[in-house]
Amino acid sequence: MVFRYDLDSWTLAIPRYLWNLPWHSADMTFDCHFDNETGRYTKYSVTADSEWATAEVSLEQKVEDVFAFTGFPDTESALVYLTHPLAGFYHRRDGKLGTYRVWHKRLNVRTASLISADFKLLSTLGIVTPSEQNQPYSVLIEPLNEFTIYLPPQIID
């Protein structure tokens, strides 16, 4: 289920108003430092300031961080389930149910450790408490990957 996307771009108006996607404008701030020698972030901090909901997340990457996926038979299976392209379902701004697909090349993720997370929407809706947000199942990060969102989305009857 897709709750929403925050975008810091004027192009958000097209999917929001043309297809009723629940995308919202946000001022995004990235404070990230990538160490090319180690291939890891020494600092990764992102904030999204929006009238609809705010979000903040800070991560760190350590050499000793390793993949650990409890409940999966192996790392490859876990990565397929956790990072494979997906179909998103959402409630359109007009109340109807919609869907669209996302595709990307295979992600070359590395593990990271969460310093802090605060997604106001999740706590406001009672889905995840602030303390639960700071105990994630896993944290995976990749410096750059291109995503393709197949539009227009479809309405589900």
Image (cartoon, helix red, strand yellow):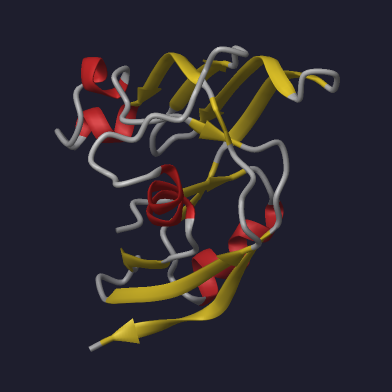
Q: Residue at image x 40%, y 51%?
A: 4
- Identity of the residue furthest to the left in this view: 126
Q: Please state if 145 lies on the left or on the right of 78 as rendered.
A: right
Give the percent coordinates (x, y) of residue 45: 60, 18
Above or below, 140 against 63 in this view is below
- Identity of the residue furthest to the front in this view: 73
How many numbered discs? 0
Q: Residue at image x 65%, y 43%?
A: 8
Foreground: 112 or 30? 112
Q: Please state if 118 lies on the left or on the right of 122 as rendered.
A: right
Foreground: 114 or 37? 37
Foreground: 90 or 80? 80
Give the percent coordinates (x, y) of residue 89: 33, 67
Q: Can you tell which quarter of the image residue 75 is in?
A: top left
Give the percent coordinates (x, y) of residue 1: 29, 58
Give the percent coordinates (x, y) of residue 36: 85, 22
Q: Please state if 153 lies on the left or on the right of 137 as rendered.
A: right
Q: Residue at image x 52%, y 18%?
A: 65
- Identity of the residue furthest to the right in this view: 37
Q: Can you tell which quarter of the image residue 146 is in?
A: bottom right
Quadrant in the picture for the C terminus: bottom left
Q: Can you tell which quarter of the image residue 120 is in?
A: top left
Q: Residue at image x 43%, y 28%?
A: 54
Foreground: 153 or 63? 63
Above or below, 15 against 64 in this view is below
Above or below, 60 against 141 in this view is above
